[in-house]
Structures are given as structure tokens and as C-alpha cells.
Image (cartoon, grey):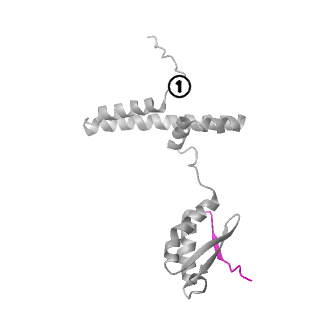
Amino acid sequence: MTQAKIPLQESVSLEALVSDITHFEQAIAHWDENQKSVVEGLKNAIEALHKEALTRLIRSVKQESMPALRQAVQDEVVYGLLRYHELVKPPTPPLEIRVQQALDQIRPGLQSHNGNVELVGIKLPDTVEVKLVGNCSNCPASTLTMKDGVEQAIKTHCPEIKNVVSVNTSK
């Protein structure tokens, strides 16, 4: 039995690929659970094969040409597939932006008491220095505000931060 050769296309649009997937999902939507579980098992087996092949390919390309690998990941389809298989990390905003996002999250509560918090500095690898200002700077509950508010928010947004230090920059 001879195997028919399917011509390779230069490229397929992401929209066309998503449309195909949607078409097949709709086709099996009304199947019974046994039929759906067979399709799901087949899909999982194919995905496991693809993930293993991609992992080996990345390992090989990484040894030969890291710039080529970085360029390949710039393609939205390649990036999407590698993200789906958890072979590349999701983009993460820089540390300073994430610290500011954490501080922005708690600012409304501080501002409701005529206070605020400022980022003084980041000391890599794991320390952030902040300053409570306004009414928060001399409030009897400032230690609690730092521990349960500021520190918790920063550590949630930036798990790599281990130390949040309150500093007084006034001389």
C-alpha cells in the first residue's frame, strides 16, 4: 500500500488553524461520552508526542543556535504552541513594574487614611525597600500595614522577593 504524499504549504494562517479546530470540536459536540473519551484520549496521546518532540527539538536547537530559537519563538503560532505545552515561560513584566502594580493595589486603602507608600529601591536578588508616607508614616498601626498590606501585596506579585523593608529617607 502506497502512502499518499500531502504537499507541504508555505504557511497556514492562525485563523485557518483555529477554524479547523473549532470545526472538529463542533462535529463531536453531540457524540456520546464514550466516543468523546476516545477522541480525548487520542488528542492527549498526540499532544504528549508533540510535547516530547518539541522538547527534544528545543534542546537540540538550543545547543546549536540560541538566536535561532529566540527568533522562532517570535512567531505567534510557534510561541502559542510552546506556551500550550508549557515549554516557554509566559512573559513577565519587569520586577519594578510588578512591585509598582502591588503598591497600586494597596494604595486606595492607604489613601483613604491620608497616607501612601513609595518604592525607595530594589536590592537584588530579593529585597524591596519602601517608605510609608503621609499619615501612614507615623501611624501606630504602620507595622501591621507593612506586614499585612505592603509586604503581602509585593510578595504576591513578586514571589522572588523575600524581604520587604520599611525605610525612613528623611534626614
Q: Is residue 95 left or right of residue 15?
A: right
Count of all numbered marks drawn on residues in the image: 1
Q: Residue furthest top?
A: 2
Q: Which residues are magenta?
A: 160-171
Name the quadrant containing residue 31: top left
Residues 84 and 105: in front is 105
SS of the residue under disc 1: loop
Q: Position of residue 143 (x, y in %)?
A: 58, 83
Q: Position of residue 73 (x, y in %)?
A: 60, 38
Does 35 sit above or below residue 136? above
Query: Around disc 1, counting alpha carbons within 10 Å, would you say few (fewer than 14), some (14 to 19), or many (20 or more)?
Result: few
Based on the picture, tell me whether residue 167 belongs to the magenta stretch: yes
The quadrant in which the C terminus is found is: bottom right
For the point 50% across and 34% down, the residue is 49
Q: Main secondary structure of the magenta part?
A: loop
Q: Is residue 61 left or right of residue 14?
A: right
Instruction: Please state which amino acid type lies under the numbered disc 1.
Output: Ser
Q: Which residue is mark 1?
A: 11
The quadrant in which the N terminus is found is: top left
Q: Position of residue 58 (x, y in %)?
A: 62, 37
Q: Is residue 2 left or right of residue 117?
A: left
For the point 53% across and 72% down, the residue is 107
